[in-house]
Image (cartoon, rainbow, N blue to C red):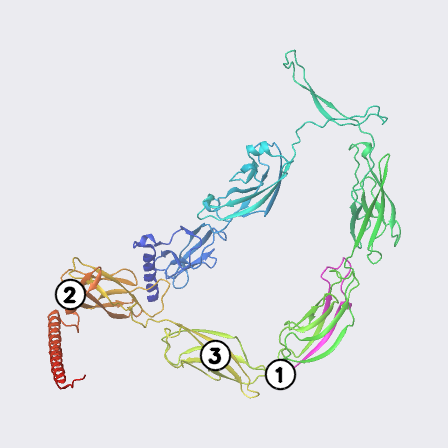
Amino acid sequence: MMMQAQLHCLCLFTLYLTTGYGQEGKFSGPLKPMTFSIFEGQGPSQIIFQFKASPLAVTFKLTGETDDIFQIQPDGLLYHNKALDRETRAVHKLQVSALDAHGNTVEGPVPITIEVKDINDNRPVFLQPKYEGSVRQNSRPGKPFMYVNATDLDDPATPNGQLIYQIIMQLPKVNNVMYFQINNKTGAISLTREGSQELDPLKNPFYNLVVSVEDMGGQKEHSFSDSTSVDITVKENIWKAPEPVEIEENSTNPYPIKITQYVFYAVAKDEHGKPLAFPLQIQVKVKDINDNPPTCPSTVTVLEVQENEQIGSSIGTLIAHDMDEENTVNSVLRYRIVDQTPKVPRDGLFLVQTYLGTFQLAVQSLRKRDTPQYNLTVEVSDKDFKTLCFVQINIIDINDQIPIFEKPDYGNLTLPEDTAIGTVILTIQATDADEPHTGSSKILYRITQGDSEGRLEIETDPETNTGYVKVKKPLDFEAVAVHNIVFQAENPEPLVLGVQYNASSSATFRLTVTDVNEAPQFSQQVYQAKVSEDVAKGTKVGNVTAKDPEGLDISYSLRGDKRGWLKIDPVTGEIFSVAPLDREAESLYRVQVVATEVGGASLSSTAQLHLTLMDVNDNPPRLAKEYTGLFFCYPPKAPESLIFEATDDDQQSFRGRHFTFSLGSESLQKDWEVSKINGTHASLSTKHTDFEERVYHIPVRINDGGRPPLEGTVSLPVTFCKCVEDSCFQPAGHMPGIPTVGVTVGVLLTTFLVIGIILAVVFFQIKKNKGQRNVESAQASEVKPLRN
């Protein structure tokens, strides 16, 4: 209950941080039906609401369409741990129940609806990468002659799914005039007024458009787009006068002569040219005569038929043509087979329906091994003309032959259990009489008995149908020492009705596996364990198990225990702590566990132990950084404040830290004040302006509110100093180790006096030396001999 209360406190505090509101009613309340709207794509650990139940309830239960996204804490905090996706599910129907200590429902379940609001996370896509269409010249402008379409998975009720079409390029573009236009909402393409007047297939019979589509209603800043190509063929206008009809005079051809069939109008007008009545429509029809022979649809008509088709089965239809008037005796055609090549196994294998041209099997089924192809000559006639057409009928092989093994027993083979994976241990062969290189003759081998664990596999050579038996998984003498294998050969194509695989498609093989000394085998390669970092020495933290394939005893040891935290029982594999654990030093501690066989060759194997250390509150709060250079300008004109941050080395929950702050001495409360800003930050403020120009060391107590709570006292050095351009300036006289102004002046005067004395002495000495040199020079002149 204490942990639940702590979790409850953290939950409400996180809500306060996230939303900026402290009123409990906005983010928590009683258990009742509710609806929430959440944008898709938001990050994990987003809090939705906190439910409160009656005093009898101690926990909550969440059911319904959670999709492993929505979770609820025991204190009723509902949140989602993954980003939502509206395209996956737009509405989540959940149910929340309140349970007592025995797991019985005391409230609910009540329905909770999560509506996922759309964001623009899908781009529009055209249904086709290329479109083709045609339009006739002089078509009415604005009348659509084709459409392009695109789709967008975003919500069409929002701008995210609202698509706008646009023609961004027309080639060729004559005189910079657009001949085509598009409805930006429907994608309908039509002619512009200029296109209706100027399109001419003799000048430009083809046009290409590049059409784009954008979502967000065409708002460029946040929209996605796609483009497609549209090829347009310009066709000639059919609404025009017919060409002149020419008839040769004195023609000796049989009459009536067909010239054309057309319609014209007769108009009655008075002498002033005004109509006297509505125009009369006059139709002229030219009577057809049988003057066209039948024509074949192509040089050779190719049809196909499977083997073993039943008599009467339809093979295909030959459709000849006659240009004479339809539905008259001149165009009625008759079909007749006049030749069959080859005539094996007999002539007359096919018949053709006289008036339909449909071919059928006449007397028996066909076999491709008799002949793979038949060529028929067919006479097609009307009442006056005859034409010969040619039909080729190909026989398609069916799977009516089973694979047959070259021998029924492939003998015995002995292999050690450590035979390398991929080793070919046997070659098998079966044959099939169906058409080569087809699904009817291809052979696939499989093992139907003697290898339930799938230690072997068979690969087939596609050219020769040879089967290569390989080791797929390690052989195991201890599991199965003798394998009595049964091979089955089959085709990928199904057999025809009435044909079944039999003993000829099976073969046997005996594989004997010999023992090889093997290393112990762990039950798993990675063992996971989890303990609190404050467990007492000697606490069991995990257990590993291994077995020796030969049944030898096993001795366990640890490798890589660099911190000396653990020990393992060499017989049972139980692992214990032998020193204090510290999550802050290493939160996931990895060591190797070694299993060594006792006796034999002393073979060994290793597995991993991953020990997760769960945090306990064993680190007091401290300042997040070293705060130096904190100052207020002197003299202060008004109370001021500064901000500092706290932290600790314990694990942080997803709700964040929750520190409280206070002054470390009650005697300072008349001058200073500490105020909490959020869970990690606080401000230190002055209460008045009567401070000296010096450094103040302010003690601050920080409490982490944990279980148990830990508290730390930190010192914030704050200097009151004169400021120059918002920077602290301290006079030299107030800086320790620096002489005052008076002392400095005295030192300077003394220095100047000493320099003056030294200069005077030097000057006196120079004068003295100069006089002495003059006397000596004069004396030397007096004693110097004269020279002529």
Q: Is residue 446 visible?
A: no
Give yes or no for contact between labels 2 and 3 (Cβ–Cβ under 8 Å).
Answer: no
Residue occupying the point 72% across, 70% down:
467
Amino acid at pointer 3: Gln
**In this rendering, would 128 be left or right of 354?**
left
| Front residue (pair 759, 222) | 759
Which residues, given as a range, are shown in magenta?
487-516
**In this rendering, would 597 be left or right of 275?**
left
Question: Which badge, 1 or 3, comes first in the chain's sequence?
Answer: 1
Q: Residue furthest front?
A: 788
| Front residue (pair 37, 693) | 693
Q: Which residue is mark 3?
A: 592
| Front residue (pair 570, 167) | 167
Q: Secondary structure at mark 1?
A: loop
- Residue 75 position, x and y percent, is 36, 61
User: In the rendering, which numbered label is found on residue 174?
Assistant: none
- Residue 359 position, x and y percent, is 81, 46
Give yes or no for contact between labels 2 and 1 (Cβ–Cβ under 8 Å).
Answer: no
Q: Which residue is mark 2?
A: 693
Vertical arrangement, residue 701 with respect to residue 126, above or below: below
- Crowdedness near tag 2: few (<14), some (14–19) or many (≥20) residues, C-alpha within 10 Å: some
Q: Which residue is mark 1?
A: 516
- Residue 273 position, x and y percent, is 64, 14
- Residue 755 position, x and y percent, is 13, 75
